[in-house]
Amino acid sequence: MRYALQKFGLFVLTLWAAVTLNFLLPRMMPGSPTDAAMARLSENGPVTEDTRAAIEAQLGVPDGNLWEQYVGYLNQVVHLDFGVSYAFYPEPVSGLIGQALPYTLVLVGVVTVIAFIIGTLLGVLAAWKRGTWLDALPTISGQFLNTFPYFWIALLLLFLLGYVGHLFPTFGAYSATAVPELSWDFFVDALYHAILPASTMLITSLGGWIIGMRNAMINTLGEDYVTFAEANGIQGRTVAVRYAARNAILPNLTGFGLTLGGVVGGSILVEQVFGYPGIGYLLFNAVIGQDYPLMQAVFLMITVSVLVANLLVDILYGVLDPRTRR
């Protein structure tokens, strides 16, 4: 319990620092949304100060000194009120994130979990059967796939299976005629559209989990307690899973926590290539449109998700390896 409370206290302190930095960084950047809007308006003629004041009022640009803005920002964060989007005016930021978040969580989240489970199991198998084809096949394949970037695999699948083969949709999360709702027809349609982006992320991420788990597993298999368990005639599968894999999985678990925390941010390149309306696609449009409230909210969500994932991994570490609680 003391270990968990210490980790939670560190989480709260880190969260406060992240929220504060998220408040300060946009205000340290040169320019402002008002300047961007006035630059576009000035193309049609000079812009007066009254127009500038009207734009600031319309966009909800904060006023007052820095401390007053900070207190107001903390109050907004507590109430999940991130203001109005500049690029999608007058849509509220929370509404835009609420629309995009389910697609990212389902697509990126499910693929991340599946890739971790399959990659970890294949890594255990490769290490336990090292020197055989059961080791060479997943290891070489994983190293080969791990060299390709996300966008290259995405473009390749898009061209071959989308434009040439006409097997899968090439854009969006559902058909133009579909209505987003909790129904079987919409689920099947959304799943059909998610096959290509999901395959892209699965192919490019699987190799890292295989190689990482295999290397950690091989090191663990050389430990004395594994040799002692084998000498006592314990079944090989039990030695591999309960003795070697339990300790070897800790580095992979750390990476999984960081990756799972980044799920909320989506996969910007993949979502952009396939036009998938997730958080990554939303963040890209926010950057292009200089939408500071939307960028600020997305960055905060990504930061919080990573911190929560790290907290859960730290607690799980304490369960799997009691030495970390000392």
Image (cartoon, helix red, strand yellow):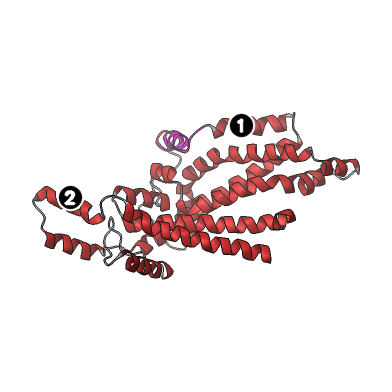
Left or right relative to 123: residue 54? left
Considering every residue shown, the one lying at the far right of the view is: 232
Where does the image place residue 99, in percent across and percent down from the top left? 40, 60
Do we see residue 193 in this rendering? yes
Quadrant where the C terminus sits is bottom right
Front residue (pair 138, 283): 283
Task: Give, as a three-letter code, the residue at label 2.
Answer: Ala
Find out whether residue 124 is within the magenta segment: no
Residue bearing the label numbered 1: 141
Instruction: Find numbered disc 1 in the image and state the secondary structure of the residue it sits on.
Output: helix
Where does the image place residue 226, in percent across and percent down from the top left? 82, 42
Instruction: Find numbered disc 2 in the image and state the secondary structure of the residue it sits on.
Output: helix
- Name the residue at 17% across, 50% down: 40
Residue bearing the label numbered 2: 39
Front residue (pair 160, 214): 214
Task: Give, as a three-letter code, the residue at label 1.
Answer: Ser
**For the residue carrying disc 2, how many other residues have a C-alpha within 10 Å: few (<14), some (14-19), or many (20+)?**
few
Magenta-drawn segment: 148-162
| As drawn, 5 above or below 219 | below
